[in-house]
Amino acid sequence: MPRQATTTTARGDAFLRTAAALQTLALFFQASTAGLLLTSSRAYTLHDYGSKVMYGAAMLYVLATVLAWRPGGGSPRPVLYSTGFLVLASAQVALGVAHVASLHVPLGVLMCALSVLALVRALSSGSPLRPATGS
């Protein structure tokens, strides 16, 4: 039974890392298409589709943190962080639809930074959801 728990934990950590990477890549795609909006008329379509992918990636990241947290019973803090990020993503989409660039752009920069931090935390040697053991 311990072997199965270890395998489940490893799969949960791999899913968490993948979801964090996908979220970060989607945000960098959004940043690049936002820059293209200044020079190309087709960039709007890319930015629009990218926003849907980014929002889906944020939901996937919430799911990944919940699935990685539940088996081990660790701290629920990453779940709260990912849920907060989903709230920011919702605000980002609403601001983008309303064309409020003065808030949409800085929030996008903040989300990129937070996503990179989440990715670094997910890729660190230990699991971000379980306390480190040892000295």
Image (cartoon, rainbow, N blue to C red):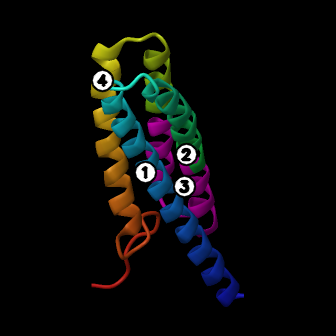
Counting from the top left corner in percent of width and height, residue 30 is at 41, 37
Query: Where does label 3 land, which residue?
Result: 65
10 Å crowding of disc 3: few (<14), some (14-19), many (20+): many
10 Å crowding of disc 4: few (<14), some (14-19), many (20+): few
Q: Is residue 21 above or below residue 113?
A: below
Measuring 54% from the left and 55% from the top, which residue is drawn there? 65
Q: CA distance from mark 3 to mark 4?
A: 36 Å
User: Looking at numbered disc 1 in the image, what kind of residue is underneath it?
Assistant: Leu
Secondary structure under the numbered disc 1 in the rendered image:
helix
**Magenta segment main secondary structure:** helix
User: Looking at numbered disc 4 in the image, what kind of residue is underneath it?
Assistant: Leu
Span colored in magenta: 61-87
Q: CA distance from mark 1 to mark 3?
A: 18 Å
Query: Where does label 4 land, which residue?
Result: 38
Measuring 56% from the left and 47% from the top, which residue is drawn there? 62
Q: Is residue 72 above or below residue 29?
A: below
Query: Where does label 2 land, which residue?
Result: 57
Give the camera-side residue of 107 and 127: 107
Residue 25: give its label.
1
Counting from the top left corner in percent of width and height, residue 135 is at 27, 84
| Front label number (2 vs 4) | 4
Q: Give the mark nearer the N terminus: 1 vs 4.
A: 1
Q: Tell me if residue 80 is in the magenta stretch.
A: yes
